Image (cartoon, rainbow, N blue to C red):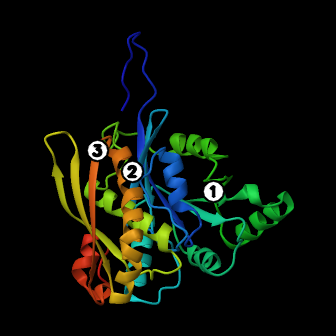
Amino acid sequence: MTEANETGTPDAPTRSGFVALIGAPNAGKSTLVNQLVGAKVSIVSHKVQTTRAIVRGIAIHDKTQIVFIDTPGIFAPKRRLDRAMVSTAWGGAKDGDLVLVLIDAERGIKGDAEALLDSLGERQGKLILVLNKVDRVKRDTLLALTAAIHEKVRFDETFMISALTGSGCSDLMDYLARTLPEGPWYYPEDQISDLPMRQLAAEITREKLYLRLHQELPYASHVETERWEEKKDGSVRIEQVIYVERDSQKKIVLGHKGETIKAIGQAARKEISEILDQNVHLFLFVKVRENWGNDPERYREIGLEFPH
């Protein structure tokens, strides 16, 4: 799509496309998506496998709209929820015009990262290697790691970045902007994610939950936004439920005299309020829902297919 500007000469055509990010858990995919989009669209946590469903972050660079698909980390699945997440991740990779394979340079290629590279051999399409956390690794180690990765998989391009500081990210964005196909934009110019706000708000609370309790709380917890009410004074009242699997987990989330859930609520309310640019009244409740990890309805709500 090419338009003429006021002088009558044609402007550069608009471009758009989908860029999938795949990698082992905690390789830094969510941090990178947030860095490239310039806003919080994906939750970041010390706890592995926090991205469960596919989150799309939308960035505009030059005249290109880049839609990032932040997939769950790819790892060896043990439970039903794990299988659903890995299946979703590979599905997201298929949807991308380009696939960025993120490797933690500090951790190198072992475990889940090695298994991921081995499984890429038979995959078609343009593969881009992105080495993250390169600021923490010596140059010689980095060059040896890059050579070892290229022996396993043939990548079209390689980028060395720090998702946390943004170092190297502008070169990556320049490349994506000129490589994606010409065509109209998929989303309005000011939209940064296709996640509904109710779901994004639930994701933010889930992040604060993990940041506060990542060593004590099991992975099988889930947050749902149950009520969203716009008030006449311009504020919004949000009610969310934190679901856990056992009564003992409920006590951990509540904390002594409710102090833990109060701190989680304050941190989540502050961030949701900043994103909405509205005053937020956030009310959190904790409920026990035994074995929710085997409930098909929960999978649909968080955007995963229920694996049989």
State how many labels appear: 3
> Alpha carbon of mark 2 to alpha carbon of mark 3: how far?
9 Å
* First-in-chain label (1 vs 2): 1
* First-in-chain label (1 vs 3): 1
Q: Amino acid at mark 2?
A: Lys
Relative to 63, residue 286 above or below: below
- Residue 142 shown left or right of residue 120 in the figure: right
User: Residue 308: percent from the left, percent from the top?
Assistant: 30, 89
Seen from the viewer's position, the closer of residues 298 and 121 is 298
Badge 1: how crowded within 10 Å, few (<14), some, or many (20+)? few
- Visible residue check, residue 94: no
Labels 1, 3: front one: 3
Marking on residue 188: none
User: Residue 152: percent from the left, percent from the top?
Assistant: 69, 73
> Alpha carbon of mark 1 to alpha carbon of mark 2: how far?
42 Å
| Residue at the disc numbered 1 | 156
Labels 1, 2: front one: 2
Quarter residue 2 falls in? top left
- Visible residue check, residue 44: yes
Seen from the viewer's position, the closer of residues 214 and 293 is 214
Secondary structure beneath dot 1 equals loop
Secondary structure beneath dot 2 equals helix
Marking on residue 270: 2
- Residue 136 shown left or right of residue 3 in the figure: right
| Residue at the disc numbered 3 | 279
- Residue for point 41% across, 9% down: 7
Q: Amino acid at mark 1?
A: Asp
Q: Are marks 2 and 3 in contact (CB under 8 Å)?
A: no
